[in-house]
Amino acid sequence: MRTFRLLFVVLCGLLCCESALAQSHHSRKHRKTDDSAVYLMAIEGVDNQGNTVAEIVEMNYIASRGARDDFEATRRYGAKQVPNPQFIFSTHDNRFSLGIGGFVNLRTSYDFKGAVNNIDFVPYDIAVGGNPLSRQRVMMDATTSRLFTKAVVNSSKLGQIVAFVDMDFRGGAEFSYTPRLRSAYISMMGFTAGRDYTTFCDLEATPITVDFQGPNAYNQRFATLLRYEHAFFEKRLQVGLAAEFPTVSGTYGEYFLPISQRVPDIPMYVQYRWGRSGRNHVRASAVLRNMYLHNSFTKENTSLFGWGVQLSGHLEPWRCLTLYFNGTYGKGISGYIQDLNGSGLDFTPNPENPQQIQTMPMWGWQVAAQYNLFPGKMFVSGGYSMVRVDKQNGFYSAEQYKQGDYIFVNTFYQLTDNCKLALEYLHGSRKDMSDEKGTANRLSVMVQYNF
């Protein structure tokens, strides 16, 4: 009899979860929420406290609704962000909830009339000149499939605490399927500590693409960081400041050597939101850097000051239309522009005096538009992105990168709540300081299933 009663309570609790999720789903008019099953723990413990079946069912309903609302309230929006997990486990008092989820992503691509020497469509890696070995390429890739776990703790002393860890399979050589830690952080009281997207990145300012990297002028990269953020005026105005582990990529030449870095990068931003549900926003960002290196000629250490500024945003002028943009300019910030990350262009020797070192001026911008043909089911989008490295006392070599262009057109179709299909065309080019140019084209299809 006792076993039957507990099974009855579990069944009633799950039915209440379904009802709570349905109500939560219909209450959000502008942002579609994910249908996640909420499983409650310690039912027997509650029953031993003398609660009736009706009281337990009511607590289950409140806990499931609270857990679902906690996950929705702490969800991040933007390109490459994960949906709410399909399974959420919660305690009866909703002090702790844990979600587990992920997706399988398969992309098939064909490069023609020029191929990119990269699993992603990176204009920097387009071959310059008429190389017959780089005209065509076919690829099938599932390394961007993801696994993640997220915990939300409602603490009486520290407020709401979020712990998040996710991974993909981009950790080794191309197509090696080695697991890679993408992010691992904890957030509470406005602070975020761990590995996360750089604070210089505006997550909602870039369009969704089949290509994993996306527009070459964007700056979606990870950093180990300590960040503080605070919102004012009903969360319409928000500011952020962080200290991030520095990554330097320079060309040292004959007279300079790399050494350990001593000062973290300092990115910061101020952002303003408006419109329905705060979906429109504009953000102004900046980053300050102090890059250390050793002068082998003077036998002394020296440093170079790098800096960058950015204006970015996400606009919805009409219900079916979304606009994205960002523009970046600075010196010695190659790690904050996707096409230049790891390029060795933070600094180069002065072409007029190799015993001197100089930061390189660089800039980039991207604009894109997305039109929802059938809201929640199908959209089409397209955009243009460009990155350029300017000369500083001339250029270091004729093969040095000068400019990269990135053009995309795609369409995404939501086949089911969990299954997504997409088709995309990409065109890119790379120009060197010698003005020699190379181009490439890519056609991609994608299928993704969330779980």
Image (cartoon, rainbow, N blue to C red):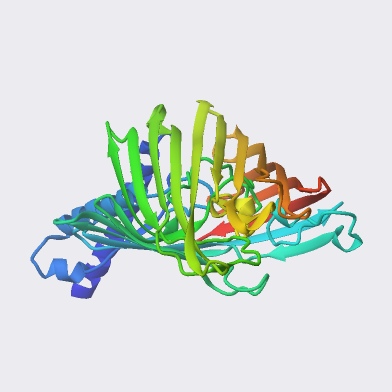
Question: Which residue is located at x 50 percent, y 35 percent?
Answer: 311
Whether residue 285 sits left or right of residue 151 in the image: it is: right
Whether residue 312 sits left or right of residue 434 in the image: it is: left
Q: Quadrant of residue 277?
A: top left
In percent of width and height, residue 396 lies at 71, 54
Relative height, residue 264 to residue 365 (above, below): below
Front-lying residue, 214 or 53? 214
Question: Which residue is located at x 48 percent, y 61 percent?
Answer: 302
Relative height, residue 322 to residue 83 (above, below): above
Front-lying residue, 85 or 109? 109
In percent of width and height, residue 356 lies at 60, 56
* Residue lying furthest top: 317
Question: Which residue is located at x 49 percent, y 40 percent?
Answer: 309
Front-lying residue, 162 or 114? 114
Question: Which residue is located at x 18 percent, y 56 percent?
Answer: 158
In percent of width and height, residue 55 lies at 15, 56
Count of picture labels:
0
* Residue lying furthest left: 50
Whether residue 291 sits left or right of residue 253 in the image: it is: left
| Residue 181 in sight here | no
| Residue 281 in sight here | yes
Quadrant containing the N terminus is bottom left
Relative height, residue 216 to residue 277 (above, below): below
In percent of width and height, residue 206 lies at 56, 42
